[in-house]
Image (cartoon, rainbow, N blue to C red):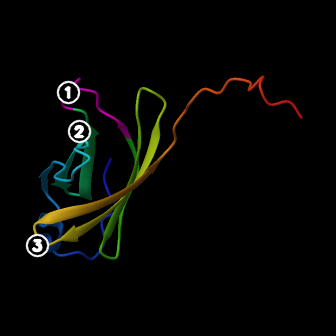
Amino acid sequence: MTTDKTERSTAELDSWVGRWVCVDQWNHNIVIAISKTDDGLDVQAFDPNDGEVAEIYDPRLVGDVFLFSAHWSTGQFTKYRVRQLGDELEIIFTYTDATHYKRDLSHQH
């Protein structure tokens, strides 16, 4: 998916372009690949361990922040908020998750 093209310079769009990998202590395995198109920017998110590619929704540049959402085959839906910090990206993400609960029979009310 591509962003809506606005009055952005080629240099500004070029600064987002690349294959971005995580460098933090959590070692997230997702790769973010951003490319430039005639319409603005295109983004892919994928897991290099198993080749899974997320479905991308609503990519857009808002000021100096790149926003998009990704839906993964597990059902997880992730919202990404991306900022440039020098030659790195800061990516803040929120996601849906699932877990299982069992009834606590030792505690009755």
At x 74%, y 24%, the residue is 103
For label 1, the residue is 49
Circle 1: element type: loop
* Lower sequence index among marks 1 and 2: 2
Between marks 2 and 3, how big is the CA–CA gap? 28 Å
Disc 2 residue type? Asn
For label 2, the residue is 29
Q: Are marks 1 and 3 in contact (CB under 8 Å)?
A: no
Left or right, 104 with reference to 48? right
At x 56%, y 30%, the residue is 99
At x 78%, y 22%, the residue is 105
Pick whichever, 108 or 50, lies toward us. 108
Start and end of the magenta stretch? 48-55
Between marks 1 and 3, how big is the CA–CA gap? 32 Å
Pick whichever, 52 or 62, lies toward us. 52
At x 14%, y 58%, the residue is 17
State the image coordinates of residue 48 (x, y, percent, origin top left).
Answer: 18, 31
The vertical placement of 107 against 18, above or below, is above
Q: Are marks 1 and 2 in contact (CB under 8 Å)?
A: yes
- The quarter holding residue 47 reads top left
Disc 1 residue type? Asn
Pick whichever, 85 or 54, lies toward us. 85
* Lower sequence index among marks 1 and 3: 3
Circle 2: element type: loop
For label 3, the residue is 11
